[in-house]
Image (cartoon, rainbow, N blue to C red):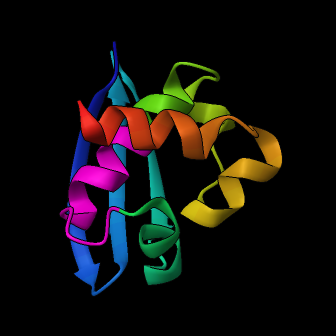
Amino acid sequence: MSQINITAMDPGRFGVELSEGPDTTNHEVRVPETLLDDLGVAGVDPEVVVRESMEFLLEREPASSILPAFSLDDIPRYFPEYKDELKARLAG
């Protein structure tokens, strides 16, 4: 299981460090307000959205395969189920 460390950089931009054993990867993740509005989760802490999104990705691919910099609205291009899954995770 990977450890996820998240650091707020700017509003809507986060640094994410994923650690699994001796391996560590670093990622810059952007959280567009439009995505939060589209999902109906505008009041949810963006850091929670980033954490749930990274867990979603780690369930589908190794940390080393996750892009070093991306926007959360890029994820549905690779995983069409992302938005529905994220809504469910944030609701429960």
Residue furthest to the front: 40
Q: Is residue 83 visible?
A: yes
In magenta stretch: residue 52: yes
Work out which quarter of the rendered image holds the N terminus and state it. Answer: top left
Residue at figure coordinates x 47%, y 66% from the top left:
28
Q: Compared to 71, does 25 lie above or below?
A: above
Question: Which quadrant of the figure has residue 78?
Answer: top right
Q: Please state the total of marks drawn on the protein image.
A: 0
Q: Is residue 71 visible?
A: no
Q: Which residues are magenta?
A: 41-53
x, y percentage for residue 42?
Answer: 30, 72
In magenta stretch: residue 35: no
x, y percentage for residue 35?
Answer: 52, 70
Foreground pick, 36 / 74: 36
Q: Is residue 92 left or right of residue 77?
A: left
Work out which quarter of the rendered image holds the C terminus and state it. Answer: top left
Q: Is residue 36 left or right of residue 81?
A: left
x, y percentage for residue 60?
Answer: 63, 21
Residue at figure coordinates x 60%, y 57% from the top left:
68
Residue at figure coordinates x 43%, y 81% from the top left:
33
Question: Which quadrant of the figure has residue 46?
Answer: bottom left
Residue at figure coordinates x 32%, y 62% from the top left:
41
Q: Compared to 58, does 87 lie above or below?
A: below
Q: Compared to 14, does 4 lie above or below?
A: above
Residue furthest to the bottom: 10
Magenta stretch, main secondary structure, is helix
